[in-house]
Image (cartoon, grey):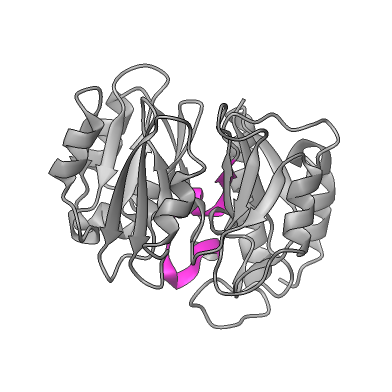
Amino acid sequence: MATFILSYPDTAFVPHGAQASPTAASGAFAQWLKLADEIHRAHGRILVLDPGYVGKLSSVYAALLGSSFLSPGRLPKPVFLRSNHGESVAEDGISRAIAEAGLDVSVAKQPWQGQVDVIPLERNRFVITYGGVSGSSAASVEEVKALLPMGAQVMAIELAPSCPRGSAAIGFLNPSSGRPVLLVSRPSLKSHTPEDLGRFLGDKADVLIMDPDDTAAFASESLNVRGTLLIPTGCSTILRGVLFRRGFRLIEVDVSALVGPAGGGPKLLTSELAGLVLSDDAPSYLLRRDRLVNLQAEYPS
């Protein structure tokens, strides 16, 4: 079962890049609940974290919290590497909650945005991105590589100055059956091309270059939950058709009140705990849903 970290908006939540509004948090929380419901319906398990901050951003952007690494033969137990956005996070509530769920938590020594800059492919291959708009540093690549499984093949890609993060440029989508597809935005890459990625990936998947509309819609940040693909609003009809023919069950999820003017897709709002099963004591969404619905009803609207 796929497991994800999600963190709901607090009453002071303001989407990244938006102006403060007394009702912004209520609308964002309503969208967050719908996203969580869709993940649950697709048989994903959710670890709910109470609101906090990653750097100056809300923990709602869970993919910026860090990333889990499960590397048999290299790590004695699963590790969650917290992102480094220039502020100390060693003893914050987010780290404590993740540790209580059963992961060792450490903090990246180099500037690093988290899971958004680590793209797992097939056959122990990974893309690690850096650069872009205040993104991960080049030095973070080696730090992340040290946590990957033994024998991992890595392509390090520098992002174009206008690209906010790796997941906004590259998305690897693997259906339950059929050939995987790699979504790529050509203008978002600086050091490599989509063709370079295709050669690295091999002949077991297809590279699909996104058009400007799909790049703007953050189609590459669609969230794959066991073959159900949660896609952001605004994805093109052509892309939808391609993904449907690949065997994905497509569900459109509106996250505009969560991502705000800066934009993003459902993947930005989750941190996947790949290969990990949480204990029954972890604060799962299923156990907390009724309380979360009641809490959202108390937000100013």
Q: Residue drawn at (51%, 55%), measured in percent from left and top?
A: 114
Q: Is residue 198 above or below residue 294?
A: above
Magenta span of residues: 258-272
- Whether residue 33 is visible to the viewer of this picture, yes or no, is no
Q: Position of residue 293 (x, y in %)?
A: 78, 51
Q: Residue furthest top?
A: 177
Q: Position of residue 240 (x, y in %)?
A: 30, 37
Q: Position of residue 79 (x, y in %)?
A: 64, 43
Viewer-proximal residue among 125 and 57: 125
Residue 270 on the magenta segment: yes
Q: Residue drawn at (31%, 65%), measured in percent from left and top?
A: 163
Left or right side of 38 for 247: left
Q: Position of residue 27 (x, y in %)?
A: 63, 64
Residue 265 on the magenta segment: yes
Q: Is residue 269 above or below residue 162?
A: above
Left or right side of 245 for 133: right
User: How many tags in the picture?
Assistant: 0
Q: Residue drawn at (82%, 45%), measured in percent from left and top?
A: 290
Q: Main secondary structure of the magenta part?
A: helix
Q: Is residue 171 above or below residue 274?
A: below
The part of the image, by quadrant, that contains residue 285 is: top right
Left or right side of 283 for 241: left
Dividing the image into 4 quarters, which one contains the N terminus?
A: top right
Dividing the image into 4 quarters, which one contains the C terminus?
A: bottom right
The part of the image, by quadrant, that contains residue 95 is: bottom right
Viewer-proximal residue among 158 and 147: 147
Q: Residue drawn at (68%, 63%), measured in percent from left and top?
A: 9
Viewer-proximal residue among 197 and 39: 197
- Whether residue 199 is visible to the viewer of this picture, yes or no, is yes
